[in-house]
Image (tube, coloured by chain):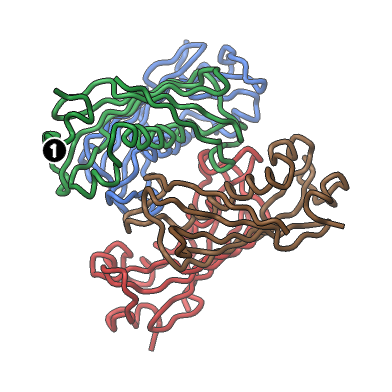
Chain colours: A green, B red, C blue, D brown
Amino acid sequence: MELHRTSVRVRYAETDQMGVVYHANYYVWMEVARVELCDSLGFRYRDMEKDGVMMAVIESTCRYVGAARFDDTVVIESRVAEVNSRSVLFAYDLSVDGRPIASGTTRHLYLNSEFRPIRLPARYHALFGLK
Amino acid sequence: MELHRTSVRVRYAETDQMGVVYHANYYVWMEVARVELCDSLGFRYRDMEKDGVMMAVIESTCRYVGAARFDDTVVIESRVAEVNSRSVLFAYDLSVDGRPIASGTTRHLYLNSEFRPIRLPARYHALFGLK
Amino acid sequence: MELHRTSVRVRYAETDQMGVVYHANYYVWMEVARVELCDSLGFRYRDMEKDGVMMAVIESTCRYVGAARFDDTVVIESRVAEVNSRSVLFAYDLSVDGRPIASGTTRHLYLNSEFRPIRLPARYHALFGLK
Amino acid sequence: MELHRTSVRVRYAETDQMGVVYHANYYVWMEVARVELCDSLGFRYRDMEKDGVMMAVIESTCRYVGAARFDDTVVIESRVAEVNSRSVLFAYDLSVDGRPIASGTTRHLYLNSEFRPIRLPARYHALFGLK
């Protein structure tokens, strides 16, 4: 399965008084990575929502092993770790200058525009590597 | 015109590496104060949106004269500074322990649910002190 | 072990275009709850940091089972789920009007002001229920 | 005076339930632009802080004339609008696909590491275009 690499430059707004990035902001970076992973898989997440399919987060986890600081370049490797017709699990590894700082996951349920769980429409199966 | 007083306790997430609150977060507190000011004027902003009237921000300003720190209690005094049938200006004074830290304003245009500017419906006139 | 209950009123800033609260913001509410839990245990987290003891997040998890919307009152029940001389695990249950919306955890390492792991100083043992 | 152009891709986290970007987030983008403007002027803001010079925000303003939506590419043109030995004013113009969405300013005071106002050290004068 494809592994996508993206990077973000740490914003001042993302730091806290400990002098490092506030832990919840790692999840925002995972979102940035996930959107770019979708690009690399062949669709824009924005278009998927317009197409009536949302991916609602039902679980998120992160283990922090190092700190990111203002102006660091954080590299995020993301991939589809598990996928079926009901849900998808993305996994992320974050590092700064080759030094791991965190790894995380987000699990998503496919919803229609009325927020009801749906099966992933067939037109997305190949994009997600679902047979 | 009524002056409303509310307070927020500073969250760790709101600080930055300078050890004080990141400047953009003051605008979020102004939103908290504005929503409570609406309560005190006699309506919930949530209900106003459900009623098809949104107040979109078209201008925001803030002058910072002191810092807020983690766990400080920030008192926000808010009021309707100007109002007419097209827009409204809210003004805010922020302090910690009686010490001023900032003053700001937000100007809003009334929009309908298609994001078109509208005149404030008559049923809100008295609430805003509009004759 | 003591269970603490706090509540937050959902801010507009915390919502996203799905019309519900963005998932990462649940972790900010857990921080709000944790700080109040510390209050109820007998110390202010701010003072603990000034005393040279930080609680750095090394793991965070959240399972989302329902949505929170703008202006909802979110009740957060928090507790110390595990504690030893090296780390502590907090657990949180979030609900709106008695309806569960999420449950989560954060695990923290005690650090000194040079960001080195330390044993929890004895003066905090009783507060955390550590024998 | 040099005009710098940078861009950001709108994050889902930055939107609100109106389906557009929450107004306070424009100030975070101004920070992104300002940091890059410093790069283009010949120094990294991070290094300036390590060098004992902070630029604390004492005023911020923004006029909103259009909306930014999830996944839009927002172009931010920034420049030093006024500068003297005590403070500096940055100005920003934001657009999406050539359509203006906002313009703003931030005024900053130079502070030393004890948060005291200082004169801009001579080594930065040329970089800011200060004679």
Residue A14: x percent and y percent?
Answer: 53, 39
Q: Is residue C123 visible?
A: yes
Q: Image quadrant for the C terminus of chain B?
A: bottom left
Disc 1 packing (10 Å; few <14; some 14–19; many ≥20): some
The foreground one among B41 and C27 is C27
Placement of D85 over or under A28, stated as above or below: below
The foreground one among B70 and D61 is D61
Task: Give the residue displayed 48% in from the left and 66% down from the top.
Answer: D64
Q: Would you identify the image quadrant in which residue A63 lies?
A: top left
Residue D89: x percent and y percent?
Answer: 70, 60
Q: Chain of mark 1?
A: A
Left or right: D10 in relation to A87: right
Q: Is residue B99 visible?
A: no
The foreground one among A68 and B75 is A68
Residue A53: x percent and y percent?
Answer: 19, 42
Residue under circle 1? Answer: A117
Placement of A85 over or under A56, stated as above or below: above
Q: Please name the amino acid that badge 1 sits on.
A: Pro
Task: Give the residue displayed 18% in from the left and 47% down from the top.
Answer: A52
